[in-house]
Image (tube, rainbow, N blue to C red):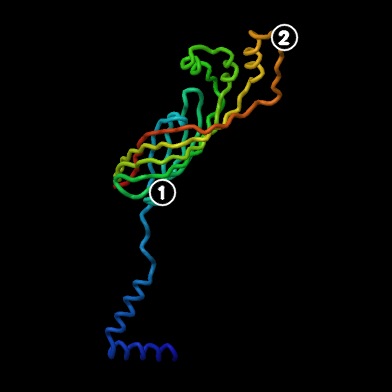
Amino acid sequence: MVVRRLGLVAGIASVLWPGAVEAAEGDARQTGPEREGPPAVLGVMLDAGVPDGANAALALRPAPWLRLHAGGGTNTVSAGVRGGLTLMIPAVVSPSLNVDLGYYRDGAATALVRSFAGGDGALKPLFERFGYTYVNLQLGLELGRGPVQFFVHGGLSHLSATLHNATEALAASTASRDPSTTVVVREDPVVRVWAPSVKLGFLVLLGAK
């Protein structure tokens, strides 16, 4: 009975005030589900730099102003992993803020040290097992808005490395000066340092226009 009365009232209202009924229906449509935002875009990213080395990663852009990435690479000594995020302004040329966290496992870096320093010397034992963890805090430029985009990032990196075989390195260093001196390091020292860093690369976004 109540339903019939409500239907009768609605019918009378539609006859007397048709504009009000249409406006109410329009308001109901406007207050319906909101339009969905742009879909997340998946891509592939390649870059090289210091201390990152050369890396390949999967990139995810859940929003035009945010890009996430995770992957791995090499620093010519060992393999490593890295992940990070980029905050940017959606534009053809955009400034960006970048944060990365990476890790390279221990590897023999003696050949690399020899190529730069010209010899192993007393430092050789320290680089027989050498790896490090790094955190990048960088500003950059993002170039392009299509499926292929380029970037250059620069800033500071915090590196943390454990020095193995420190006793052997100190023994080799002091043996030539005083063979009777014995130095023992009971725990591997950890070196932490801030250093300049830079990287450049590009990414291909799958399905982006």
SS at badge 2: loop
Q: Which mark is residue 195?
A: none
What is the quadrant of residue 150 in the picture? top left
Say which of 69 and 152 sits in front. Answer: 152
Which residue carries the number 2 mark? 180
The location of residue 146, given as percent across then percent down, is 29, 44
Give the residue displayed 36% in from the left and 90% down from the top: 9
Q: Horizontally, is 172 left or right of 11 in the view?
A: right
**Considering only order in the chain, which callout, 2 or 1, is on the residue closer to the N terminus?**
1
98 over 77 or under it: above or below: below
Q: Is 126 in front, or is 62?
A: 126
Q: Is 197 on the left-hand or right-hand side of 92?
A: right
Q: Quadrant of the N terminus?
A: bottom left
Separation of marks 1 and 2 at Cα, in angstroms: 61 Å
Q: Residue at x 55, y 30 (%)?
A: 132
* Image spot of residue 66 (x, y percent): 41, 49
Task: Provide residue 53's location: percent of width, then percent of height.
Answer: 45, 29
Q: Position of residue 174 (x, y in %)?
A: 65, 12
Residue position marked by numbered label 1 in the rendering: 66
Q: Is residue 24 above or below residue 189?
A: below
**Residue drawn at x 50%, y 17% as measured from the top left:** 113
Label 2 crowding class (10 Å Cα cut-off): few <14, some 14-19, many 20+? Answer: few
